Amino acid sequence: MHIVIVGAGEVGSSIAKSLADSHDVVVVDVDPEKVEALNYNVDALAIEGDGASLPTLREAGIEKADILIASTDDDETNIITCGTAKTVADPFTIARIKGTNYLETWQGAEGALGVDFMVGTTMLTAKSIVRVIGLPAAHDVDTFAGGRVQMAEFEIPEASPVAGQTVQEADRFESLTFAAIFRNGDVIIPTGQTGIEAGDEVVVIGSEESVHELSAEVSQHTGDVDDILIVGGTEVACQIARLLEEQGLTPRLVEHDHDRARELAEELPNSRILEHDGTDREFLEREHIEEVDTVVAALKRNERNLLVSLLTKRLGVDRAVAIVDETEYSELFEAVGVDVAVSPREATAEEITRFTRERRAENVALIENDRAEVIEIEVDHDSVLADRPIQESIQDLPEGLVIGAITRNGDFVIPRGDTVIEEGDNVVVFAETVILEEATAKL
């Protein structure tokens, strides 16, 4: 496909890097330094210019484009860019949007504003955090087959009973597949005898019940995760609280500004709004922070989120999740003690990349910065999987692929070597990115 990306910041550059190997990608930005860096580092054509202007879009080949992705930091520019492109061509337009008001307008009439698909950064980040909150020890969580299948990535702590066991010993759950282990930069496709070491990143696919059982064992967390403290009254904090309310929970949200605290109290009737400084140690101790299951640091500045996370961890909170504006800081946050760092920019780039790839699959999740994918496909009569036992059909697929789960007529089917996959089944597969094109051609 010919893909035009407007905006060569962190989001646009990440999308370009993910798509350039298999598509004709042109990136537009007004900043000459970003254009030069992209031309040097990514196998894509980068041009300098205003992506919202028709002459620049024509220079980028908009009239032959299959997809236009507007990914600047300005919502209005992204919407105008999509609308401008529609005046001369008919690409599928994707707009990155931070404000929830535009997202709500678009959701009321999809295709409005010249935008075919809108990625709401705020809501996307909130949903990512809420999924992680519900699964102790998980760094990444995604769902497939209408929620019947769950994928999760866990870091194995030294104190976990799973550390030091083989996959066969650790797999004590009815419907779970250990799909991959990331260790020291390598991807390991495990067998039953593969050992699990402390510090490993383990990817599992299975039923929600089995994934939650493993999560409890990895984290040694007993009981429900229902005592949640959100620090910060930002829009993403508000959306996190609202999603938790929808699950029947009553989160506490701390906001220092009086007027904003009153607004939040009106918007969130089932949350407890606390008007205070979330970095005040005495206040946190009065709120019994040591009994809190998860703290979410959702302030406007990275350094404040880091401070809240480290302070609450020191005071005894089970788990700290922090929002990080710059993706490159995520690893640093986690290295110094934050349990999970969530980057809205990274989440947005992955969502847009995922959407462009969903044209070949029902659903897609990107793993470890696009080193691997978990994809959901519906098996048709041309698939090498159709009407064959897995132990036979897997021989015709490249190494680095694991069949993680099967759903049939709404029921979960545990994949085993002698399981026969039928036409019409939905299959959830883990695959390393390097073999993905070959694998999907056969699936």
Image (tube, helix red, strand yellow):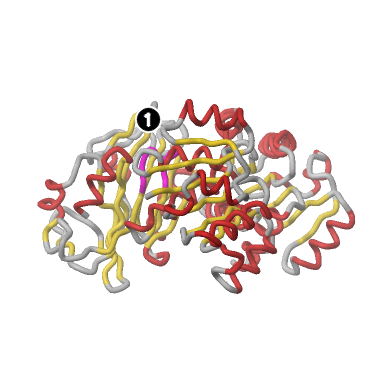
- How many numbered dots are placed on residues in this image? 1
The stretch drawn in magenta includes residue 368: yes
Residue 225 seen:
no
At a point 61% along the width and 65% down the height, the residue shown is 113
Which residue is depicted at the point 58% across and 51% down? Answer: 54
216, 92: nearer the viewer: 92
Q: Provide the residue span drawn in magenta.
A: 366-373
Residue placed most toward the observer, 193 or 101: 101
Q: Nearer the viewer, residue 438 or 93?
A: 93
The vertical placement of 50 against 131, above or below, is above
Q: Residue furthest front?
A: 55
Q: Position of residue 13 (x, y in %)?
A: 52, 38
Is 87 within the magenta? no
Amino acid type shown at disc 1: Arg
Residue at the spot 19% in from the left edge and 67% down from the top edge:
423
Percent position of residue 69, x then y: 52, 51
Q: Quadrant of the C terminus?
A: bottom left
- Tell me if 402 is positioned left or right of 212 in this view: left
Counting from the top left corner in percent of width and height, residue 145 is at 37, 64
Q: In the picture shown, does residue 6 fall above or below 379? A: above
Residue 90, position as x, y percentages in the image: 47, 61
Q: Which residue in the protein does label 1 denote?
A: 183
Please tell me which residue lies in front, 331 or 94: 94
For residue 45, above or below residue 37: below
